[in-house]
Image (cartoon, coloured by chain):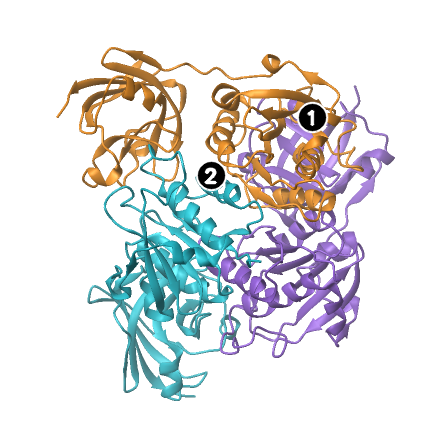
Chain colours: A cyan, B purple, C orange
Amino acid sequence: MVAKHSLVLQTDFGLDDGAVSAMYGVAKTINQDLDIYDLTHNIPQYDIWTASYRLYQTVKYWPAGTVFVSVVDPGVGSNRKSIAVKTKTGQYIITPDNGTITHIAQYVGIESVKEIDEATDRLPGSEKSNTFHGRDVYVYNGAKLATDNTHFDNYQNELDVDAVRKLNIFPPVNREDEVSGTIDVLDIRYGSVWTNIPFSFFEKDDIKYGDIFDVVISHRGTPVFEKNIKFVKTFADVALGEPLIYINSLVNIGIALNQKSFADTFDLGIGNDWKVDLRKVKGE
Amino acid sequence: MVAKHSLVLQTDFGLDDGAVSAMYGVAKTINQDLDIYDLTHNIPQYDIWTASYRLYQTVKYWPAGTVFVSVVDPGVGSNRKSIAVKTKTGQYIITPDNGTITHIAQYVGIESVKEIDEATDRLPGSEKSNTFHGRDVYVYNGAKLATDNTHFDNYQNELDVDAVRKLNIFPPVNREDEVSGTIDVLDIRYGSVWTNIPFSFFEKDDIKYGDIFDVVISHRGTPVFEKNIKFVKTFADVALGEPLIYINSLVNIGIALNQKSFADTFDLGIGNDWKVDLRKVKGE
Amino acid sequence: MVAKHSLVLQTDFGLDDGAVSAMYGVAKTINQDLDIYDLTHNIPQYDIWTASYRLYQTVKYWPAGTVFVSVVDPGVGSNRKSIAVKTKTGQYIITPDNGTITHIAQYVGIESVKEIDEATDRLPGSEKSNTFHGRDVYVYNGAKLATDNTHFDNYQNELDVDAVRKLNIFPPVNREDEVSGTIDVLDIRYGSVWTNIPFSFFEKDDIKYGDIFDVVISHRGTPVFEKNIKFVKTFADVALGEPLIYINSLVNIGIALNQKSFADTFDLGIGNDWKVDLRKVKGE
């Protein structure tokens, strides 16, 4: 008796047409009993960085054995590889080898990587279609792997874990009374900024709620925001519209306005071009 | 053998990032066999009123034993309580105690309320995170309750049903040849206006399809719309773009344009500031 | 022992309110074990053509026995019929008889059509509601049919397959060195244009990757776009922002820009008013 695992899909396809449903149908045709869920289908088009971050934000909360299929694939049909990745925490990710596993590799760890042969490991009869590997290759393999995790052993071509494509991540820096990092991503709906600065930096420096920081945000070296902001436990600890520094849900440092979009208000973006410096100015 | 029940999630998180999927993962980690569904994740940010209304619109259509988790939670991490509510129709709702159960209390009825202890009834290892109770507290408890409804008995602190926080609802008024109420919510996609005037007012007054009403809509006491509109069975009973009064799907009175947005066309909003008066002018 | 089948929902309701969740609840009340999925709920309001196309794009990828419920229903509550359709590939579709099965009839084939009696085959207690047949009639019947496909035999009124309402489809034309068709739909998220010209026209004419076509797109007879474009295997075969002709995922001819919206850039729409002519100018 083989244990069944969830299949979780992420794409940049949106939910306005039939693309995602066709993927569900292929999975259900392989295994009618499969449980299928969405991570998100609203990754900005072609935005591999954000796809990578959303896997980091979610994969570890799912049971070992869960199979993720992530398809942000501007190179579909070209010679970029297709891979199946097993994480150190026991989940699987099937995706083009284009940087999508960057954050998982960095923060979770990869145990093993197999290459998927797009010519043979694909939906039978789909050979004339070259632009929808989400349906024809990725979910097809994802459904098999979710049905039975030992399907991973069927992929003969094991790749070097370190050879998998990764995007650049600039490590956060912990100096005396100052920490620095980048804006990794936004908490989109609320406009909060999520940095890559771990809360452990604050713990090491014995920083407490109520401490105040001089926050400088720079874009390509040019400061675009500077303000003194208090480190608090939660949004409601400051007045409506006021800024706060807080521990986000991945236990990294976030910066926000209470019930207002920090990113929109100050026109902030994400990625390595966006640097955040926090310098402690006083305790309370 | 314990019966399994569906877990249904509602938030204002949107579906553009990984927040909802992390909630699903936590639920699946508690019970791999759980069936999880979405009510909506597009409640306008911080809009407790609309969250409350959407529960009223849906809860009664689900089987007894279904567990709803509703997270519109501007006070996350503050001293607002977390509660588990059992409705008189046998469904459960887990939510911050911030007014989210207003319409359920009014129109469905609450049988019993328990307090959830955020310090102990939470995802193990999540203690450093203070801003994502949707994942760390609410869905964690929701998954346990959906797995086994008797988990409700484990919450030791029973609260007074009447002490639960409720928003103000202004009751509709039935006078001779005139009924009044407020705009509770929009049928968003089509722009129809849903009032809190029950169709039973019409039944009592022996109003028939074809009867015409003088409709006045006021905002904070100032009339912003007035027109004679016919009460009909359905949209297609009037020409394209023409107004109609109809019985909506919750058997309350709705006002709409056929295949055009009534709310957008006349710039109408929702809530207690928006009053609707219907005065019968003639029958046919 | 009756085999369980998936229930798949499509509407133009959006996911911002409780309408779709109320439909799920009705289905779950009929059968707690039912697997329910979404095709899309973002069909443009009242757009029967697009609803029809999305069924064509997805139905065949799901297992035989799957039940689709499609509700784009501007005539709800009027005298338009409600029907249950069995396709030649063994899936079922429950929908208003308003043209929604046009593409399925044309490209997949209908085996049998039954009429649903809206007065008797509906959610008990829903009789006062006339504007939400998605909940009160369609998903109610869909859940019964997904629970047990033999429920199809219970509908006594069999309709003539050819009498079912269909929208006009203009067939594509294959002339010497020139093929013509219409713009059926957009690959919405990316802005690619999907024509109704089958790739088989290219195969018959021995067209190869690298061949160049003079592409003319006309709106109601007036040319609005003309350019020489190369037929290639996939997007990445041309530079960023450059046009391409390709085989789309339904093995029809698509036209796109690489990582840019072709439809937005040239302000193109869909439907029979939009004609596409491709004339081969040279091979390579």
Q: Is residue B242 visible?
A: no
Q: Nearer the viewer, residue B15 or A89?
A: A89
Question: Which residue is painted at 46% across and 37% down in the image?
Answer: A18
Q: Where is residue B6 shown, x and y percent of the image?
A: 67, 55
Is label 1 on the same chain as label 2? no
Marks 1 and 2, Cα distance to the nearest angstrom?
31 Å
Disc 2: CA contacts within 10 A as few (<14), some (14-19) or many (>=20)? many
Name the residue carrying label 2.
Answer: A22
Q: Residue at x 62, y 75 (%)?
A: B118
* Residue C136 x, y percent position in the rendering: 71, 35
> Label 2 is placed on what type of residue?
Ala
Quadrant placement of the C terminus of chain A: bottom left
In this orientation, does residue C176 appear? Answer: yes
Answer left or right for B255 relative to A212.
Answer: right
Foreground: B131 or B38?
Answer: B38
x then y, percent, for residue B43:
56, 52
Looking at the image, is C156 positioned above or below residue C122?
A: above
The one of C56 and A115 positioned closer to us in this rendering:
A115
Secondary structure at numbered mark 1: loop
Q: Of helix, strand and loop, which one carries label 2?
A: helix
